[in-house]
Image (cartoon, rainbow, N blue to C red):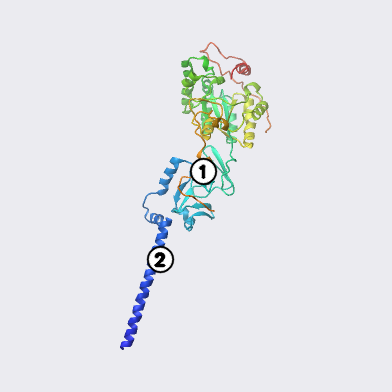
Amino acid sequence: MDKKALRQSRERKRRQIRRRKIIRAVVYLLGAVLLVIFVSRGIVKPIIRRIFGSGPDDSNTLRTEAVESDPNAAIRRPLKRVTDTEKLTALTPGWHENAEGRWYQNTDRTYFAGGFMSIDGVQYYFNEDGYIVRDDWITLGVKDYYFDETGSLEPQRNHPLLALTFDDGPGPYTNRLLDALEKYNARATFFMLGIQIEEYPDILPRMQELGCELGSHTWNHKDLTTLSLEGVKEQFRDTDDLMLSVCGQTAKIARPPYGSWNDDVLETAGKPFINWCVDSMDWSYKDAQKDYESILSADGLGDGAIILMHDIYEPTVACVEMLIPKLQEMGYKLVTVSELAEASNVDLQLATYTNFWKSSLEAGDVPGYRGTATTESSYEPFEFTISDGYGEYREEESTEDTEDIYEDESEEEEYQEEDSSEAYDEEYSEEESW
């Protein structure tokens, strides 16, 4: 080969080497740029963890922090789960939508999930997969929340809460009342007498199964202010002991007979006293239709009301069979007293309660009120701004008379009547102080 051809061959090799170096440098530069982008977007770490299965679980850490501040607040979840496949293709922060729904990506390549979050002043609820709830209700604890077609919370479209409470039982009609509660998925609170629990012990476990609340109404319905403090203690202790043996629990709340109490009685009982703001007067009427109309026309009926009834009367149970669907039609949700307190942000104290109306709460008339729930206001746990865009009543014949529940052979005064209805007329006459 001559010298000229050799020089040309060497020159071609030099040019090829230079091109390779330039291409290699460009590739390295592009790789470095992409690496910086991926690291800043939080993509590399989830991929490494998915491959090697190492490193702490950020979602658990974040969940713990969120729960400690607000159990209903959304958490930030890294994009790393198998169910996040569709989300991984979205590289920009903000709102995104796919076949599963609408979700929000943060600047650190995380997304909100499992709770409430306020974005641009609008409150949303993100499910466990990170998609917002739209045109639907969700239930958290006792409270229900509605989100419109855009996913925005409509706080005014909530279910007002009521507590139906029943005294002096259990009795021969209580199971029928429980049938109605079960049918309509409603709950109630029963303030029971020890002497009645002795006669109908099997009813209490069913109350528990249906989510009802078991309260004490003393042993045999004595006016507690007329008893010694030791007598008061016995009234609640004996009832609690029996309840514990029958269903494994004691009463956490109580109702004093006739609504009669004083500070010494309350302290001796050692339980929150629950009275009422709506008296159905069923003990006087003993007429299902009158009971029904009395409740629906009561001034105290409304969100946070406590309604007094008696499950020992058959007309009362017939009334309840009409009343529950009517109240639900009106938008009410029927809960227990303790659930009503919880939803009202009230920690029950050693005090007396008659209602949980909003006006009473705001006026400071309800002991243990903790203020407005965080889920009803904006929740901003992170230091950055997000922007982007009536039924028919058919009376049934009673197969057995209601027994005299106030019989106590150990007392000089005995409530013994051949006709149980006459006994209750006398016991609950209008002259008595409720």
Q: Residue at x 45, y 41 (%)?
A: 69
Image quadrant of residue 258?
A: top right
Image quadrant occupied by the N terminus: bottom left
Residue 428 pos. (x, y %)? 61, 18
Amino acid type, residue under disc 2 in the picture:
Leu
Image position of 196 (left or right of 45): right
Counting from the top left corner in percent of width and height, residue 18 is at 35, 75
Q: Horizontal and vertical percent for residue 285?
A: 66, 22
Q: Residue at label 2?
A: 30
Q: Amino acid at mark 1?
A: Ser
Regarding mark 1 in the picture, which secondary structure is present there? loop
Q: Is residue 426 left or right of residue 13?
A: right
Residue 170 vs 38, above or below: the answer is above
Q: Is residue 410 above or below residue 187?
A: above
Neighbours of disc 2 within 10 Å: few (<14), some (14-19), many (20+): few
Visible residue check, residue 202: no
Numbered marks: total: 2
Question: Mark 1 or 2, which is nearer the eye?
Answer: 1
Q: Position of residue 306 (x, y in %)?
A: 58, 28
**What is the C-alpha distance between the residues marked 1 and 2?**
43 Å
- Disc 2 is placed on an element classified as helix
Position of the C terminus, as image quadrant, is: top right
Residue 309, disc? none
Task: Please name the residue shown 42% across and 46% down the image.
Answer: 62
Please report the residue visible at 35 percent of the width from the left and 72 percent of the height from the top.
Answer: 21
The residue singled out by tag 1 in the image is: 378
Judging depth in this view, the residue of 274 and 426 nearest the camera is 274
Residue sticking out furthest to the top: 412
Does residue 257 appear in this view?
yes
**Which tag, 1 or 2, sits closer to the chain's start?**
2
